[in-house]
Amino acid sequence: MNDKTFLKSFILRQRLKKKREMETSISLEERKRAEERKRVEMKMSLKEIRLEFEKLESKVEKIRLEFEKLESKVEKLKQQKHILFSQLKKVLNEDGVRRRNRDLQWTTDAALFQQEQQLQPLPFAPPFNQQFFAQRAPPQQPFKAAFAPKPNVGRKRSHESRSPPPPANYKSACVTYTPNIGKVDFANQQQFYGMMTSAQSQRKYY
């Protein structure tokens, strides 16, 4: 009996030992497989990360090239802005010079015209009302002396002197031409008509 029980217990112990060894071997295999799987996954992840990194590097390079292009465009635009600003400044200066020259020319022309009007007598009689001719004052004495003809000594008359035309005809002839000019002072008009009528009345025809 003792031998049988001993043999039975020995067989059971051997079976249990084998079972444990198998379990340990299975666990080791599974552990190895798991580690291999993890290793493969890590390799794949590293490859993917490397590929992603390369893609990012290419994108960064493209962005850098685009940035350089934009910098060149900005530099060109700055140069164009500088050129346009200089041209605008030049045009404004030329316009100001032309405007000043034009104003100076107008001022000079106006001064010359005013000086000529003050120095030279009017070549025609400005229009007046008929009442002014009817109520005109007699000519002044200095104009008579200035426009009186000098006596001709020792000269014979070739024919008889004709009488001067009536003042009314001269008035009507003076009124016929009415140019569009500026206003003339009334005192200057009166002196002008007195001068012209006195010279006409004292003129002799031969």
Image (cartoon, grey):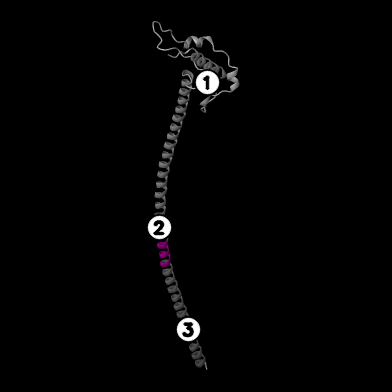
Does 54 sit above or below residue 108? below
On the image, the x and y values in percent for residue 171 come to 53, 21
Magenta: main secondary structure equals helix
Q: Residue at x 45, y 23 (%)?
A: 112
Q: Which residues are magenta?
A: 47-55
Q: Nearer the viewer, mark 3 or mark 2?
A: 2
Residue at numbered disc 3: 17
Q: Residue at x 41, y 55 (%)?
A: 66
Relative side of 132 to 72, left or right: right
Does 61 sit above or below residue 97? below
| Foreground of the two, 32 or 127 | 127
Does 3 sit above or below residue 204? below
Mark 3: secondary structure: helix
Residue at numbered disc 1: 169
Q: Earlier in the sequence, mark 3 or mark 2?
A: 3
Mark 1: secondary structure: helix
At label 1, the amino acid type is Asn
